[in-house]
Amino acid sequence: MVNQKDYLRIEKLKKKARRYSITEGIFASAKTSVGDNYISPFAIAINSSNSIVALLGSLHFLGSLSQIFSSRLIEKYSRKKIILNAVFIEALMWLPFIAIAFLFYHNIISEILPLLILLSFAFYTIVLNITPPAWFSWMGDITDEKKRGRWFSRRNLIIGFVAVVLGIFAAIFLDYFKKNNWTMWGFAILFSLALLFRLASLRIFRKQYEPKIKLEKGYYFSFWDFMKKAPTTNFGNFAIFRLVFSFTLAISSPLIAVYLLRNLDFSYTTYITIILSGTIMSLVFIGLWGRISDKYGNYAVLHLTTIFIPLVPILWILSSNPFYLIFVPSAMSGIFFAGFNLAERNFIYDNVSQQRRGLASSYYNMCWGIGISAGALLSAVLIKIIKTDFAEPIVLIFILGSIARMIAVFWWMPKLREIKKTAKFSKSRVIKDLILKQAKPTFIEDAHEIMSIKKYFTD
């Protein structure tokens, strides 16, 4: 039994840990903006085939396997120690990408560099995915269940704003280097910044409070046990849905960079502007999704968002006008994936006990990884074998991806249910109560959070 004094001390430490988490998220987002987001463009720049670019998406399966392994580490080591070691190695994994840029610039073994990117990204994916089970469990222990949706939406808002600003900077920077025939130098500098930003994340993780977790005997269950029982539980059905839905998402998503940079021949600035418009729209709506999640439940958000997400691939191919691509498919993707990603994380928290969060999230991500990898492999095969005169192969793949998403949503969403007590959900009530009545205050609060971003860089 915790006394009042200890309780207040722990709550104070948790509050400080949440602020540190937002600060760490800022640097993690910066790393993604100048690093992860440019892996596919980098592969295209060194003349990788469309199949190689699509195969990069299939490597998520390795990350999922890594999470199953790393989820057991919580039994022997503190979550903080796991993350500190993994993040340090992850930062160093940017060195091979920097080396590949220099090798291509000097025309050294350039013919095998696409394969080296594939290999380097495979190792990077494995290391990157050591942290999520421990991080997911850790965050669950420092957040308040009743306000979790709003806190994660605030965190996503802050780090999303950083992603937009740095993403635009990186694109303009890279285009400048490309015009001066220094493209590889541009990539090398961006990847070096990614390394430094991840080391900054490491420094912040060292300061963050970690509540103790006690794992009782018998808490563990294998992935195969989980899958056998999955159809009989709410969380299990959700994991199967995520596997199927991820498969359908990955049929077209790995080829968006190819479509914009090769088929439409856009500059890096135009490309990243189109991609980041989705991020901007996610920032505008993330506060509303957080309110809907807290008041009406996470299933309500999943239900609303999965109505529209299947339409996105078809919208990409209706017009090649950059303004259309910015304001229709990319913006729509940003709005609804913001809600979906927020709700899926909180749905796991609602359905899984505290001591099994790390384990369950690793199995859930395993399902996600299997789906993503299988979909990306299919995408790589289809882009290679489809030969038609009436339409470009990539257009047909986008149409197929959209149809597959619709089927997955229609079949699996009715199998899920909300388990926490919430207000009665209806589409009309959500629109009236949360969008028309509370949109303005939400946007004002969100703008205030962005304007006061500097407070997250101080103790």
Image (cartoon, rainbow, N blue to C red):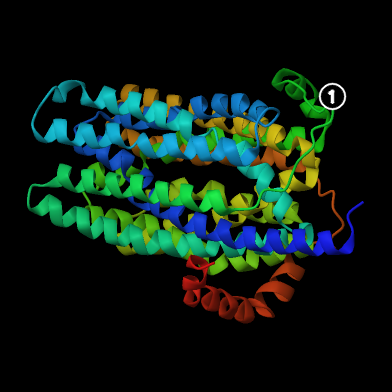
Q: Is residue 249 left or right of residue 189?
A: right
Residue 407 in sight in this render: no
The percent coordinates of residue 199 (x first, y second) are 41, 47
The percent coordinates of residue 108 (x first, y second) are 11, 25
Identified at 32% across, 55% down, the residue is: 272
Identified at 57% across, 77% down, the residue is: 443
Residue 459 in sight in this render: yes
- In the image, residue 6 sits, relative to residue 48, either above or below, namely below
Identified at 77% across, 25% down, the residue is: 220
Q: Quadrant of residue 185?
A: top left
Residue type (three-letter) at the residue carrying disc 1? Gly
- In the image, residue 66 sits, relative to residue 319, either above or below, namely above
Q: Quadrant of residue 320?
A: bottom left
Q: Is residue 272 left or right of residue 13?
A: left
User: 399 and 242: which one is in front?
Assistant: 242
Q: Is residue 454 left or right of residue 386?
A: right
Identified at 61% across, 81% down, the residue is: 440
User: 17 and 175: which one is in front?
Assistant: 17
- In the image, residue 366 sits, relative to residue 88, either above or below, namely above
Residue identified by numbered label 1: 218
The percent coordinates of residue 333 (x first, y second) are 49, 54
Q: Is residue 446 left or right of residue 360?
A: left
- In the image, residue 185 sits, relative to residue 76, either above or below, namely below
Q: Quadrant of the C terminus?
A: bottom right
Q: Quadrant of residue 398?
A: top left
Please count the marks in the image: 1
User: 413 and 39: which one is in front?
Assistant: 39
Q: What SS does tag 1 mark?
A: loop
The percent coordinates of residue 200 (x first, y second) are 42, 52
